[in-house]
């Protein structure tokens, strides 16, 4: 994506972001030497191995290997795209990124299309709201009244109405260009006459908003129970259902501390719960995906999943449990609530109120209880065969859990369930090997001339000042594949006086040498800080020596075949003299 955002803008942005301030606002950093350290936010560890450099404006974890600049940190920590991370940093730095998008920064057709779809969806949402607020369609207002929704909830969630008698296309600009935009918005289809038609008819319209409050899709509820009862927009450039959680924007808008999140299935569940004062619910709008679990665990360490108590509800809950396993690090919890038959959070909160509903939340089943209850029903623990079956079912599940303490607790519980309390006997029965966290192997580079020079330069861009124009020209005569890149890097550093490691890496994002540069940026060259300048000069001298030796060999080989010219003899004499001094 960065190919479509000017490097000038990104450089200015990174110059105005202090990575120490950014990361310390999210996790606790402690200074040690010239760097800052913390427990890594991307994997479970006991000893801090997450390092942040103010000088380089760069972070690196020596445990899991993750690294990058401020843009990369937000992308990984908040599950953002590159563009979203740029926008977030722009807001922090006070840059008018959104205004600049259509003028300078974005010149890519797809990104322009995204921007146009955002505008269209917000416009359509306003039209649906106006139709509902007109009070002309009594049945729509009656439907919402019967569901117990008050005016405040209708306003907060921007609820509207799409009437079969009103063609909203009449409210929108009609042109060939707009035709393709409307077609790709996910809310219109092409009919038999090859004309656009609204897919939502006689439906209560629920706008789905991203975390910035932009409308990205719609959900429609039929007011007369026409099939399907619920209908969602098609997936588009800005909406992927499996990556979306309804209600996230409303939670963030309140700016409250998120201690837990209640995961429900439908948007009316979220709306009704909010109306009754439960402001921490989100809806998966179907089966909960691993990505949705990942998003929630970025916001809180405690998830309470709420499902119908029937067999379908329990199947959905089981899928959620399985999809959550790889995110269950120590300190994270997931609980399950099963509601009475024929009840959902929307209907139940209206019957029993906030206080009683919060008692259900407090009494939610821990993940381990739901896990054991489900698997025990499939096994007969009164017989050895049943115990063996139970173990075969549960072991693959336990192995997916990264939290060591949680795994140990579940293993103890297995012992109680199958009647083996002695640890060594249980170990023998289970043959369960502890899952060890696999640290990414640090890439080891040969300490050769080019790796040393490029590594030192990217970590200390001011070293470029030590290379004179005359010596820079000499480099062109060296036939080493990394030389053209090294020369390019020197020019970038010289042309940008205050450039840092983070900005250099950003310049090469998505390009051929990016991964190699990232690894050299974190490469421990074992050179003390006070010797860096000296080693760089000496290594550079070694590189120039390669030029002389190479040219010397050529002239000596030529002299064996034919007489050298006067100029060549003079050149060889000068080379021999220079090499004898080195």
Image: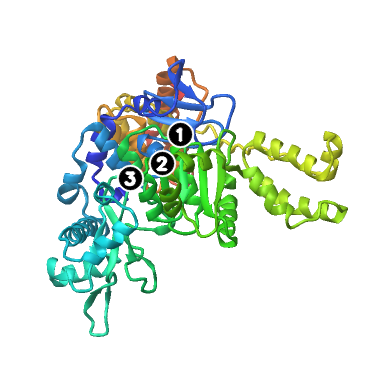
Circle 2 residue: 280
Which label was assigned to residue 259? Answer: 1
> Looking at the picture, how far across and down is residue 386, in whole percent?
82, 55
- Dot 3: element: helix
Q: Residues within 10 Å of mark 1 (few under 14, many from 20)?
A: few
- Dot 1: element: loop
- Residue at x 19% of width, y 71% of height: 179
Position of residue 449 relative to residue 481, above or below, is above
Question: Farthest residue in the bottom direction?
Answer: 193
- Dot 2: element: loop
The quadrant where residue 165 appears: bottom left
Q: How crowded is mark 3: few (under 14 residues within 10 Å), some or many (20 or more)?
A: some
Viewer-nearest residue: 365 or 505: 365
Is 254 left, or right, of 287 in this rendering?
left
> Looking at the picture, how far across and down is residue 519, in whole percent?
48, 37
Position of residue 220 relative to residue 275, above or below, is below
Q: How crowded is mark 2: few (under 14 residues within 10 Å), some or many (20 or more)?
A: many
Disc 2 to disc 1: CB gap under 8 Å? yes
Quadrant of the rendering where the C terminus is positioned: top left
Viewer-nearest residue: 546 or 362: 362
Which label was assigned to residue 249? Answer: 3
């Amino acid at each position: 994506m960065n190919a479509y955002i000017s490097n000038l803008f990104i450089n200015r942005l990174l110059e105005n972001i202090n990575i120490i301030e950014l990361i310390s606002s999210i996790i606790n950093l402690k200074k040690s030497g010239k760097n800052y350290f913390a427990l890594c936010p991307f994997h479970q560890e006991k000893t801090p191995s997450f390092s942040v450099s103010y000088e380089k404006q760069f972070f690196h974890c020596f445990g899991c290997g993750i690294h990058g600049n401020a843009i990369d940190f937000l992308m990984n920590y908040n599950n953002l795209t590159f563009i979203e991370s740029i926008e977030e940093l722009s807001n922090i730095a006070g840059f008018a990124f959104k205004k600049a998008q259509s003028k300078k920064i974005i010149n890519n057709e797809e990104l322009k299309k995204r921007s146009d779809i955002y505008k269209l969806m917000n416009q359509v949402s306003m039209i649906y709201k106006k139709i509902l607020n007109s009070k002309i369609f009594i049945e729509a207002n009656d439907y919402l009244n019967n569901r117990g929704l008050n005016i405040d909830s209708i306003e907060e969630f921007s609820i509207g109405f799409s009437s079969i008698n009103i063609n909203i296309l009449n409210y929108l600009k009609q042109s060939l260009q707009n035709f393709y935009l409307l077609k790709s918005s996910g809310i219109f289809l092409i009919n038999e006459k090859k004309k656009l038609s609204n897919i939502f008819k006689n439906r209560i319209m629920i706008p789905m908003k991203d975390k910035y409050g932009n409308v990205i899709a719609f959900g429609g509820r039929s007011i007369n129970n026409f099939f399907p009862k619920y209908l969602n927009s098609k997936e588009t450039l800005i909406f992927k259902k499996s990556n979306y959680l309804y209600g996230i924007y409303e939670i963030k808008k309140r700016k409250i501390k998120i201690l837990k999140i209640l995961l429900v299935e439908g948007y009316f569940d979220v709306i009704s719960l909010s109306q009754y004062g439960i402001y921490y619910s989100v809806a998966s709008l179907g089966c909960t995906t691993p990505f949705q679990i990942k998003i929630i665990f970025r916001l809180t360490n405690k998830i309470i999943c709420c499902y119908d108590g029937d067999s379908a509800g329990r199947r959905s809950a089981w899928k959620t449990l399985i999809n959550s396993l790889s995110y269950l690090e120590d300190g994270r919890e997931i609980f399950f609530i099963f509601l009475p038959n024929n009840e959902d959070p929307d209907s139940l909160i209206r019957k029993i109120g906030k206080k009683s509903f919060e008692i259900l939340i407090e009494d939610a089943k821990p993940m381990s209880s739901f896990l054991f209850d489900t698997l025990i029903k499939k096994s007969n623990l009164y017989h050895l065969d049943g115990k063996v079956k139970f173990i075969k079912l549960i072991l693959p599940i336990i192995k997916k859990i990264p939290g060591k303490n949680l795994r140990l607790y579940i293993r103890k519980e297995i012992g109680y369930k199958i009647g083996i309390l002695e640890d060594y006997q249980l170990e023998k029965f289970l043959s369960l090997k502890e899952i060890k966290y696999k640290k990414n192997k640090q890439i080891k580079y040969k300490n050769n001339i080019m790796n040393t020079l490029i590594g030192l330069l990217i970590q200390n861009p001011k070293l470029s000042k030590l290379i004179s124009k005359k010596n820079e020209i000499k480099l062109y005569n060296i036939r080493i594949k990394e030389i053209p890149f090294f020369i390019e890097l020197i020019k970038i550093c010289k042309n940008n006086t205050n450039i840092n490691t983070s900005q250099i890496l950003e310049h090469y994002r998505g390009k051929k040498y990016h991964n190699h540069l990232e690894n050299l940026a974190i490469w421990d060259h074992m050179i003390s800080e006070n010797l860096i300048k000296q080693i760089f000069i000496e290594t550079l001298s070694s590189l120039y020596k390669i030029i002389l030796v190479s040219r010397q060999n050529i002239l000596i080989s030529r002299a064996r075949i034919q007489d050298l010219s006067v100029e060549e003899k003079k050149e060889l004499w000068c080379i021999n003299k220079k090499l004898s001094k080195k």
